[in-house]
Amino acid sequence: MARYEIDYFEIPAADAGKTSAFFTAAFGFAALAYGPDYIEVREAGVLGGVNGDAGDRPAAPLIGIRTDDIAVTERAIVAAGGTITKPAYPFPGGRRLFFREPGGAELLVYQPND
């Protein structure tokens, strides 16, 4: 069985740089840019990011669930009644997928490149 842990959040932003600068100024969170459209939020107590990529960013803030086996997790989501909204794909640092649970919330699952 795959291992799971909620340990990630992602904030959509029209301008990732401005959103990241706000969180740094207001709360003192550090930042690490992976280009102009994705900036990792650091020192926030949990891993997170600001996504400004119009083709990839979520419509609303979302929670990420870490797994050690994304293929097993994808099957488990479907078997439990969830819907895959964006199949697994590579991103800097690993692979991830988006899904909607039966109540309607969209979340993501990611498997880091360890």
Image (cartoon, rainbow, N blue to C red):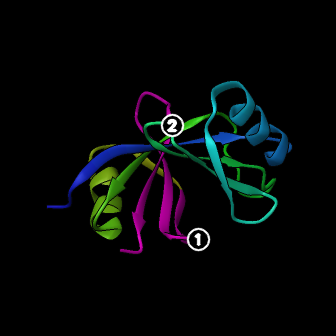
> Is residue 111 covered in magenta?
yes
Quadrant location, the C terminus: bottom left
Q: Nearer the viewer, residue 72 or 3?
A: 3
Question: In the image, residue 18 lies at what x, y percent?
Answer: 84, 40
Quadrant location, the N terminus: bottom left
Residue drawn at x 78%, y 56% is: 53
Q: Which mark is residue 44?
A: 2
State whether the magenta stretch is mostly helix, strand or loop.
strand
Find out whether the residues at labels 2 and 1 contact each other: C-beta distance under 8 Å.
Answer: no
Is 29 on the left or on the right of 37, as rendered?
Answer: left
The residue furthest left is: 1
Question: In the image, residue 99 lies at what x, y percent?
Answer: 48, 48
| Three-letter residue code for mark 1 | Pro
Query: Residue 76 is drawn in which quadrant?
Result: bottom left
Q: Which of marks 1 and 2 precedes in the sequence? A: 2
Depicted 8 relative to depicted 69: above or below = above
Q: Which residues are magenta?
A: 86-114
Depicted 38 relative to depicted 34: above or below = above
Structural crowding at the residue carrying mark 1, measured as other residues with C-alpha within 10 Å and reported as few (<14), some (14–19) or many (≥20)? few
The residue to which callout 1 is attached is 92
Residue drawn at x 70%, y 36% is: 24
Residue drawn at x 43%, y 37% is: 45
| Three-letter residue code for mark 2 | Ala
Element type at mark 2: loop
Q: Which mark is residue 21?
A: none
Element type at mark 1: loop
